[in-house]
Structures are given as structure tokens and as C-alpha cells.
Image (spheres, rainbow, N blue to C red):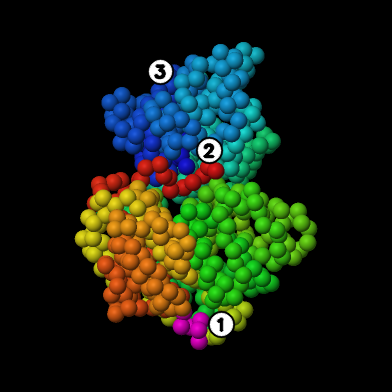
Amino acid sequence: MCGIVALVGSREAAPQLLEGLRQLEYRGYDSAGIATVDAKAEQLHCLRASGKLANLAKRFDELGSPGQCGIGHTRWATHGKPEERNAHPHRSMDGSVAVVQNGIIENHRVLREQLEASGVDFRSETDTEVIPHLIGAELQRRLAAGEQAGGPLLLAAVQAVLPDLQGAYALAVIWQAAPGALVVARRAAPLLIGLGEGEFLCASDTPALAGFTRTILPMEDGEVALLSPLGVELYDDAGMRQQRMPSVLSGADHVADKRHFRHFMLKEIHEQPETADLWVARHLPQGLPPACPVALPFDDAFYAGIERVEILACGTSRHAAMVGAYLLEQFAGIPTVVHYASEFRYAPPPLAPHTLTIGVTQSGETADTLAALAMEAQRRLDHGDPAYAPRQLGVTNRPESSLSRQVPDILDIGAGIEVGVAATKTFMGQLLAFYGLTIAFAARRNSRSAAQIAELVMELRRLPDQLQALVDLHDERCAAFAHRFAETQDVIFLGRGINYPIALEGALKLKEISYIHAEGYPAGEMKHGPIALLDSHVPVVSIAVPGVVFEKVLSNAQEAKARDAQLIGVAPDGPDTALFDELLPVPDVSEWISPLLTVVPMQLLSYHIAAHRGLDVDQPRNLAKSVTVE
């Protein structure tokens, strides 16, 4: 969840650290801090501030933080309130060691009690603070034994302490007595090393490297590295030196530009037609043979023998997975089930043979999803029968992420960098990925006729223009409509069939950025309890698209209207939808592709309600975009 950066080189570290933190602030924005080592003064400087990064930048402008080696952190609070005393970096008692960490040290209470018994005075409530105290004590022990201060000693001390830490972490450590040395370590949390010329920048994610380098060395689980202006020494968890070639980031620099939009989220909603257009050009080019109507980066062996699909995901990614499951089952004829990745590890279903496991995570770093995929792969390997062998696919917006190093096949949604914490265009990209998989499986399994598949392909090719018209229409309409929700405290979203997950997504978006309590339900479930919530103060948003459940959805909407609920329809304009108090119209398309369109009014309605309330749309409270802890 948190973002860390660390730099060692020949220039002042603090400005680059702050810039890196600006690019990582989507990972957490409860507090921030930096620490640098000034070689000339032989002093470690530490600046911290609660709240947004701007508060830390102001403190730096006032006080400075000299030094050519440093670490930085932007925090999403796990242990301890978002106060300055809980902000990173944390230091040892004598102030000579500073540490930043992303993750959770699960045995921190036991370690804290041991350290307090030895006389350590803790200054924060965090789990991280045990680390600098442990490293500081190890350094003092080794210095007393006659070892020489410097980078190798700091490395040895960190390596000695890491086995005592239980949990997931990515950390960076500096020491006043080794001003040209930086030690970083990783276990079950992302960390990569950017290779510059005589300088190295470590970070939780690639945006922090923008403008610094495109050459990276992603750290593997359990690795520790010593960095100095002279180079990188990389070790595994057994202390063995590692040699590995770096890789080069593909695509454009991962730099976000808001352009003329008020918020990144609004810009990213407006980019969805482009996302769809690029996807169509890449995966549905003209001239594909009927036997292979979609271009995906997999050979025949990938599809061979698959009898069922299980999908692991969290949050918005799970809602995309639910649409995907509907498509794979109902269009392609493959039994498919979606699991909460966070629950899967603790209650996995019985193993079934010939199963494709799909992990969906826009960042490629979601801890629950990665852990569930790893557990599923291991239990299938342990089974021994080749029919149960792990077959895994990752769907992500970050092909250079941890996910890509964990699973054999990746489907890159190619949505481009998304800064807004509430996912919009990456949700669109995930949906499109499942449409591609559905077409591929349907063609290979002959579960649909060539004409039916061709019709779906043609509808998808028309999608970019439809999305453009829809975004333009509802940006204006929802902006004018948002003031009606000024006093709203609860909203119900209804959908059926393939649009039930869109009702869930609409409710989630409204909760995330406007802080209005909202729930999504299958429309047919209203009378089984939720209808008791309805009155004139509870708006109901109903998705009604012509198809097998159209009349049923309209009937459910009538039930809500009879309870005086304000009824908002997301449906084609026509006589059947006159019952809605307010209509957010969508094109009259087949039910198969309707989720790609019905989600847009949901996104824009949520955005404009939050913006009208004056809320921080891009960085809503208590959230982070990349969830890298359980």
C-alpha cells in the first residue's frame, strides 16, 4: 500500500526522492517523510509530515535535507494513526539508522516487547519501528567486536535481522556511518532497482523512475541488495551473490499528465474510448480467419484441454471478473467461478482437473491475488496428477509487475497509467480482456456459430465511437444532475444477469469517492430484504437493458417506485423506460456488450457527486490504489 523510494549517487538526493514520492502518492497519502545522510557533516537528517506530500515538501523548503544518499516514504496507515510520529522513516534510538518499509511485520508485538525489555524507547505505534532498533543493535554489536563501519557492515547487519521479521515487507535502510551505502530488501512486497549512471533509485513501482531511467532490475522474493555509486551487489536469502541481467521498461514513460481536466479520474473516464479503440486495433484487426477471430498472445496449447475456469480477484477487478465469468459460461460454454482472492487462501474449493486459474489485478501487485495464485499453483503441483497441473493466466495493466514473474501467461490490458485511486479505464480494459478470452474459447469450442461470434466482434468494433458519444453526453448530464445528491446518505443499485456486476461496481464507485453508503443487488433480490430500506430519501439506480431479463428488471423498478424511491434508470430511451424519474440513456445494443456501456454513466455520476461535494476525487480517504498488504 505504501510507496517507498531510495537513492544513492553523486547528486543531492532529496529533490529526486520528493519527485519519486509524488509519482507514488497514489499508494498512500496519510503522511510522508524522507531521510538523507550528509557525508560532509556525518549526519543523518530526517523530515516527516502528516497529511499529503505537499506538507512534507513545504517542510523541506524550510529546513532542507542535504546528502547524496537517502530514503523516502508515503504512507497508507496500517499500524498507528496517520500522525507525524507514525510517519516513516523510523530511526534507531541514537538516530543513526533510518528505515522505510512497505508491508506488515506480523510479529512486531513480540519483537517490540523484547526490545522494550532491553531498554529501547519506542516513539511510534507502527510495526516498522522495530526494524531500525534491531539493525541498530546489530550494528553496535558488530562494531564492538571490531568490525569496520561501512556499507558491507550495514548489509551484514540487515541480513542478520531479516530472519527475525515475519510477514511481507519491502524496505530500505541508510546508516549515518556509511553515507555512500544503501541497503534494500524484499519479501512478498514489490521493489525494483532503477539503474542510472553512477546512481541507483529503488522504488515500489515504476512511475517513481520516470525521467530517471528505463533500465530496471526487479528484485525477487527474499533478495537483499547493497547499493553504492560504484554498483549493485545482489544476494538471495541464503546470502549467495546473484547475477541477473536488467530489463528495459517498454512503452512510454510512466508519467501522468492531467491535461485540462479537473481531476485525473475525469480524464481517465474520458480516455476509455481510446482504451477501447486501441484494444480493438490490437486484438480485433480486420482480416482474421473465422477459426481465429481474435488476436491474443497465446498458442493452441494454452487453450487445449481446459474444461473449467476459476478467477481470483479483489474489488473492482472482481466485478470485471464476474462479467467475465458470465461471458465465459453463457457465451463460450465453460463452467466458471469467481472467488474473492482474499478468502480463497483460507477456504479453497476442492481441486478439479483441467482448470485454468486467472488472476486479475490492475497493478499486478495485489497481495491477496498473488498469494492465492501461489497457493493454488502449489497445491496443484502437490497433487501429482498431470490433469491437475497448474495452468495460470494473469490479467493486468502492468506487464512488468510481480504478477508477470509469477504466472506463465499474461494478458496486458494496455490501458496506460491510471492515477485516480478509483479504477475506471483499467476496469474497461479488464472487461475487454474477458471479451477477448470469451471469443477465443467460443471459437475453439464451437459453442457459438461463426455468425454469432462475428456479430459480437462487429459490436465490439463499434464500441469506441459509442463510448465517445456516451462519455460526452453523460459528463454534461451527470454534472447537472449531481446536486440532487447533496443530502443523500444511501443509494441502491440494481442489475440482473450480466449487468449485476455493473450494479456492484456503480455502488463501489459511489462509496469510494463520495463516501455515500451504497449497495448493489441483483434486482430480483430486492423483495427479499433490501426493499425495507426504501423511502423517498433513498435513490435507486436500475440498469435495464433489453434482453432476457429486461421486463423483469422493469418490474423490479416499479416495486421500488411504489415505495416512493427516486428512480434513476440506466437504459435505452424509449416508451418502456418512461417509468424512471431520471434516465441516463445508453445505446440500444445487445445484452452481451451492454456492461461496457452501462458502466460509463455510473462512473460519471459518482465522479460528479463527489466533485460537487468538494471531495478529493483522485485520493479518497483511507484508500490506496495498489493493495500490497493483506
Q: Are marks 1 and 2 in contact (CB under 8 Å)?
A: no
Assign a secondary structure to mark 3.
loop
Residue holding disc 3: 41
Residue holding disc 1: 448
Answer above or below: position of 246 versus 329: above
Q: What is the spatial separation of the Cα atoms under label 1 and label 2, in whole angstroms?
A: 46 Å
Number of residues whose C-alpha sits closer than 10 Å to that of mark 3, classed few (under 14), some (14–19) or many (20 or more): few
Q: Which residues make up the magenta segment?
A: 451-457
Q: Amino acid at mark 3?
A: Ala
Res. 512 mark: none
Nearer to the camera, 73 or 51: 51
Q: Quadrant of residue 337?
A: bottom right
Q: Nearer the viewer, mark 3 or mark 2?
A: 2
Nearer to the camera, 340 or 77: 340
Q: Amino acid at mark 1?
A: Arg
Which tag, 1 or 2, sits closer to the chain's start?
2
Nearer to the camera, 248 or 190: 190
Answer above or below: position of 269 versus 6: below
Q: Nearer the viewer, mark 1 or mark 3?
A: 1
* Count of number-bearing discs: 3
Assign a secondary structure to mark 2.
strand
Query: What kind of secondary structure does the magenta stretch mostly adopt?
Result: helix
Q: What is the spatial separation of the Cα atoms under label 1 and label 3, in whole angstroms?
A: 74 Å
Which tag, 1 or 3, sits closer to the chain's start?
3
Query: Does the image show residue 417?
Result: no
Residue holding disc 2: 103
Q: Amino acid at mark 2?
A: Gly
Answer above or below: position of 401 versus 395: above
- Residue at left offset 76%, top offset 63%: 386
The verdict on residue 552 being magenta is no
Q: What is the spatial separation of the Cα atoms under label 3 and label 2, in whole angstroms?
A: 32 Å
